[in-house]
Amino acid sequence: MIPLSYYLVLSAILFCLGVAGFLLQRNIVTIFMSVELMLNAVNLSFVALSYHFRLLDGQIFVFFVMVVAAAEAAVGLGIIIAVFRNRESLNVDRMNLIKW
Amino acid sequence: MYEAFFFLFALAAVGFAVNLVLQNHPIHSALSLIGVMASLASLYLMLGAEFIAAVQVIVYAGAIMVLFVFVIMLLNAGEEERTNFSRLAGTLGVPLILVLLASIASIVYRIAPSDEMVRFGDFHGRTADIGRMLFRTYLLPFEIVSILILVALVGAVVLARKES
């Protein structure tokens, strides 16, 4: 038997790894995948707390998070394709047009 | 048995996530992310969320990651050259992430009930109940996200269209 807090701490670890990937990676596609990792980590704590309260509302929230993630992935990858067409690079350090 | 499975999948999820952060090539990161999602689907099953586990595999590891891999291959993305980014971010970033992790963990330990144990099969989130709730209590949010995904669909088509 596993304490519930193990699941929540695992979710925190995955979230922090997502933050680390967001900050350390230079490739815009990998940065985007780090955001997906953070969303997944939050989903895990939703499901764990849904178990704790014996309520299904948490799982329905996970369902909505997945829909929003799918929408975000579609629009975000469209933006990435448009940026790549203009700048021929996926490196975020090269996208410094409005940086002072 | 159950504990062994928990630690197996938790270690797999953390290992794949570390690999995602450390890899230079985006396709390796994408494969690691699929591994994280598969491990999380197993953890959802152990928490009694079988519908969410199935949707995780079909929608996340299936559809969304196919989209990612497709874009990586379409753009022929290779390893990025290392650019010297802000030194402040390099030196302060990792300690601040550890601070974030420590603060989340301490809050979890303060508010999570320490005697709560997860037993496999104790709570069973049946798909029929989820569907009933989704179309009764959460009908309005459901309709709103369906409009959201329609807008995202149109937006993606407009963004990815070739300029004429």
Image: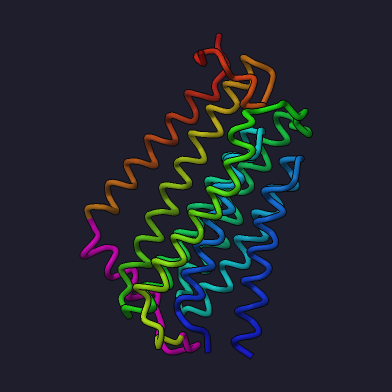
Q: In this view, does B123 lie above or below A96?
A: below
Which colour style is shown? rainbow
Q: Position of residue A10 (x, y in %)?
A: 54, 67
Question: Farthest residue in the top direction?
Answer: B164
Residue pictured at 28% horizontal, 46% vertical? B144
Q: Position of residue B151 (x, y in %)?
A: 37, 34
Point out residue B24 in the picture as x, y percentages from the top left corner.
Answer: 76, 40
In the image, taking residue A45 as reference, residue B135 lies left or right, namely left
Residue A33 shows in this picture: no
Query: Residue B142: in sight, yes or no?
Result: yes
Q: Is residue A30 rendered magenta in the image?
A: no
In the drawing, does residue B68 fall left or right of residue A56? right
Foreground residue among B102 and B61? B102
Which residue is rendered at x = 35% and y = 75% of the image? B128
Instruction: Name which quarter of the figure residue A61 lies in.
Output: bottom left
Residue B160 in the image: x percent, y percent? 55, 25
Q: Which residue is drawn at 33% across and 73% down?
A: A56
- From this view, report whether residue A4 is shown above or below residue B16: below
Residue B51 placement, left or right of B84: left
Q: Give the range drawn in magenta.
A: B118-139
